[in-house]
Image (tube, grey):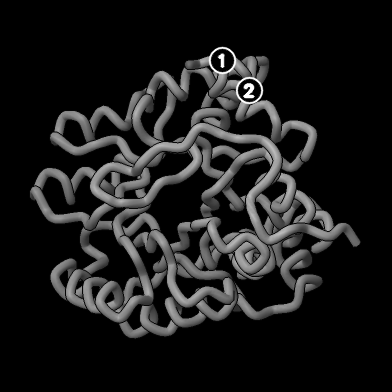
Amino acid sequence: MQEYSNHLHGDEMKTINIENTELRVSKFIFGTASLFNVGSKFRREHLLHSAVDAGFTHFDTAPYYGFGCAERDLAKILKVYPNITFTTKVGIYSPGGESQAEWMVFIRKAAGRVIRNISRPDIDFALSRAKSSLDDSLRRTRRERIDIYMLHEPYFEMIDLPEWRRWLEECVTLGKIRYFGLASTIDKLEPFLSRKLDLGSVVQLLDSLHHNEANILRRSGKPVQITYGYLSSALRADPKSNVTDVLRAALERNPTGAVIVSTRQTERLSQYARLLDEAE
């Protein structure tokens, strides 16, 4: 098995400071939502190591991604590279839980294509469950602190925001999390913005080149910090979309924040640093 050093090496990627925080991350963030689909644990870990070599310094994950596997896969990378930072989330959970065997995850995901309830996420914003979920995420990632902890696409009616804020601020004081905020879509985010509620330090928002959803943040006087979804939405609109052109346009859409991207192919990882070099 390939050995890896305990410091960042390989390609350099442009980094940015996430506004309203002291966190500096690679301009492109590596997303792990589809990591389980890469294949074996060895292949998944190799892809993550290769992403670090390609210059990624921040990873986006969640308990629901790979039904717990994505957080566990990240654990080894986070141990080998202590300077790597990551985001994980709370509120959307895996059917069958996050501790099930990989073969069960595979069966549940495959069967879910036919019987949707088998792989349907469990959405729960009860604070009691959130408290155990935070500890479970720390255990799976083997880190003492989560860099960004996001409420995972909550509807406004689902949460008692003052109660959540008190708990999250307590977690910051205890050193369990560094920053918190919302990972959302425009329909779920709008009620929070229209009521001028404090969302925490960071907002992660689904954006696209066709609908420009992130403009809602600009209209509300908030910075565009982390965005995602450009390539998937472009390919849905036009399967012949040029990947490089879409990524260039995504950088123009979010010039000061970070953009979440993903790939299952290691040979494509180097394109991200090159795109940033070209954009300068």
Residue 273 coordinates in the image, percent (x, y): 61, 29
Crowd around label 2: few <14 · some 14–19 · many ≥20 (10 Å)? some
Judged from this view, the residue extending furthest toward the right is: 1
In the image, residue 77 above or below residue 242: below
Label 1: state its secondary structure: helix
Do the CB atoms of the residues marked 2 and 1 lie less than 8 Å apart? yes
Q: Nearer the viewer, residue 70 or 236?
A: 70
Q: Amino acid at mark 1?
A: Glu
Which labelled disc corresponds to residue 274? 2
Q: Quadrant of residue 130?
A: bottom left
In the image, residue 233 above or below residue 89: above
The residue at 78%/67% (across/down) is: 107
Query: On the picture, is 97 further left or further right than 114?
Result: left
Query: On the picture, is 92 further left or further right than 231?
Result: left
Q: CA distance from mark 2 to mark 1?
A: 6 Å
Which labelled disc corresponds to residue 278? 1
The residue at 74%/31% (across/down) is: 268
Judged from this view, the residue extending furthest toward the left is: 195
Q: Quadrant of residue 66?
A: bottom right
Asked if one can make out residue 224 in the rendered structure from this viewpoint, the answer is yes
Label 2: state its secondary structure: helix
Q: Nearer the viewer, residue 209 or 76?
A: 76
Q: Amino acid at mark 2?
A: Arg
The residue at 40%/32% (across/down) is: 207
The residue at 57%/32% (across/down) is: 232
In the image, residue 136 above or below residue 234: below
Quadrant showing the N terminus: bottom right
Residue 196 coordinates in the image, percent (x, y): 9, 48
Query: On the picture, is 53 further left or further right than 166?
Result: right
Residue 6 coordinates in the image, percent (x, y): 68, 61
Which labelled disc corresponds to residue 148? none
